[in-house]
Amino acid sequence: LQLVESGGGLVQPGGSLRLSCATSGAELDYYAIAWFRQAPGKEREAVSSIDTNDGKRFYADAVKGRFTISIDRAKRTVYLQMNGLKSEDTAIYYCAARVGEPRSADDPAEWYDDWGQGTRITVSS
């Protein structure tokens, strides 16, 4: 599966952004698609994931209630709506995919086979 992220940028604290992960190369059946992020000097961490089969969603505690993951199967695109952004959300955000289903909000990055190039989010006033 090929993945291309878009939608990053500079936003003020409290603002919103929507990231897009456009997919190609395979049908979106029985995939786990996730968003990860990596802040400067920190390890890559899971943000959210979605099961393309049944729509089950998982969120990291740090973003629960603020971020929403969704899928538009017709457009073959996974979205991450980010509201109430904080400075600690500043990072490069990556879309990742693997065959199967997500098991938790903490599924490790090593489980994912396909990755996008990343899109940078900066939350600053």
Image: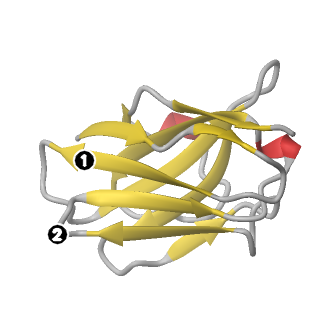
Q: Secondary structure at mark 1?
A: strand
Asked if marks 2 and 1 touch (Cβ < 8 Å), the reply is no
**Residue 72 location in percent, x, y?**
29, 70
**Residue 112 location in percent, x, y?**
44, 40
Location of residue 5 by image quarter: top left
Mark 2 / mark 1, whichever is N-terminal: 1
Question: What is the basis of the colouring in this image?
Answer: secondary structure
At 20% from the left edge and 65% from the top edge, which residue is drawn? 29
At 66% from the left edge and 59% from the top edge, which residue is drawn? 16
Classify 110 as above or below 49: above
Classify 124 as above or below 65: above
Mark drawn on residue 23 = 1
Crowding near the residue tagged with mark 2, few <14, some 14–19, many ≥20 C-alpha atoms within 10 Å:
few
Describe residue 69's horizontal placement relative to residue 43 as left or right.
Answer: left
The amino acid at mark 1 is Thr
The amino acid at mark 2 is Ala
At 59% from the left edge and 43% from the top edge, which residue is drawn? 36
Q: Secondary structure at mark 2?
A: loop
Mark drawn on residue 47 = none
At 54% from the left edge and 65% from the top edge, which residue is drawn? 103
> In front: 96, or 23?
23
Q: Please give the residue where the numbered disc 2 appears in the rendered image.
A: 74
> In front: 87, or 104?
87
Classify 67 as above or below 123: below
**Residue 74 location in percent, x, y?**
16, 69
Describe residue 42's horizontal placement relative to residue 19 as left or right.
Answer: right
Location of residue 51 by image quarter: bottom left
Classify 43 as above or below 74: above
How far apart, in angstroms, are the residues tagged by discs 2 and 1? 11 Å
